[in-house]
Image (tube, grey):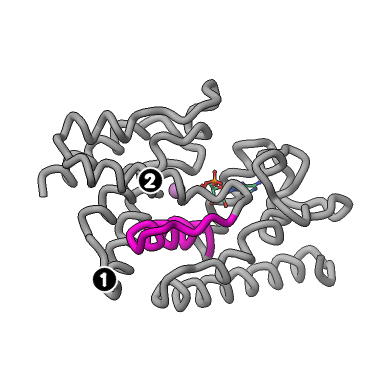
Amino acid sequence: MEIIENAIDYVEEFFKNDHSGHDYSHTMRVYLNAMKIAETEDADTFIVALSALLHDIDDIKTSPTTTENKDNARKFMEDNKVLPYVQEKVLEIINEISFKGNHKTPNSIEGKIVQDADRLDAIGAIGIARAFTYGGNKNRKMYDFSIEPKENLNEENYRDENSTTINHFYEKLLKLKDLMNTQSAKIEAEKRHQFMIKFLKEFYDEIGVEDL
Ligand code: ADP
Ligand code: NI
């Protein structure tokens, strides 16, 4: 499908200089995971594909100088003559899926699938790698046991600098498996979750502490 190929080229160009964890490879993993999940759901795969590919291009966090979401997804779809009802659905999904401390469940099955795929990419081996990459990028400490994990993340404190990457596991990553929408994502999330538990055990063992 030409529009999907255009979208892949578009995001590759878009994320060329972004190494914050919102990059082309993240987008492609979300896209491929979403397509895989969609195989076992009754979903419109074109909407799933387009929403996955465009899901991060309007986020304020990919452009720290703005305070409002951008209009890139809509512009891309206009330029590519995507049908109006598809455009609307894709924009709704992009809006719904970002975590930012709240637990909004998308209305459509397509949105649920893309949210699951995005969340899967935050856990397991890849999620661990992304978390430490993010932490390094933000100059965060790997761990500091005098800083408590935050009980509840919300839009205000989510970007708060005063935390550690290990705390992020307790604040977010270990909670994600229970937030999956689809059956196949639940199974994959459970596997990735167990890997993170194993990682944390080994981590504490190597630095000689009991647990958090
Ligand atoms: P998304 O909307 O895809 O979850 P985020 O910007 O929230 O995007 O996160 C991008 C990546 O960085 C994710 O893998 C996430 O777990 C990680 N990350 C976000 N906040 C932190 C943090 N405070 N410490 C460590 N990793 C983080
Ligand atoms: Ni994402």
Q: Nearer the viewer, residue 105 or 132?
A: 105
Q: Nearer the viewer, residue 133 or 159?
A: 159
Q: Is residue 152 left or right of residue 39?
A: right
Q: Please report contact status of discs 1 and 2: CB closer than 8 Å, yes or no.
A: no
**Which is more N-terminal, label 2 or label 1?**
1
Q: Is mark 1 within 8 Å of ligand 2?
A: no
Q: Which residue is denoted by mark 2 in the rendering?
A: 92
Q: Which residue is denoted by mark 1 in the rendering?
A: 42
Tag of residue 202: none
Label 1 to label 2: alpha-carbon separation: 19 Å
* Label 1 secondary element: loop
Q: Which residues are magenta?
A: 103-123
Q: Classify 83 as above or below 103.
A: above
Q: Amino acid at mark 1?
A: Asp
Q: Nearer the viewer, residue 181 or 195?
A: 181
- The quadrant of the picture occupied by the C terminus is bottom right
Q: Quadrant of residue 185?
A: bottom left
Callout 2 environment at 10 Å: few (<14), some (14 to 19), or many (20+)?
Answer: some
Q: Amino acid at mark 2?
A: Glu
Q: Is residue 28 left or right of residue 70?
A: left
Q: Nearer the viewer, residue 206 or 53?
A: 53
- Residue 188 covered by magenta stretch: no
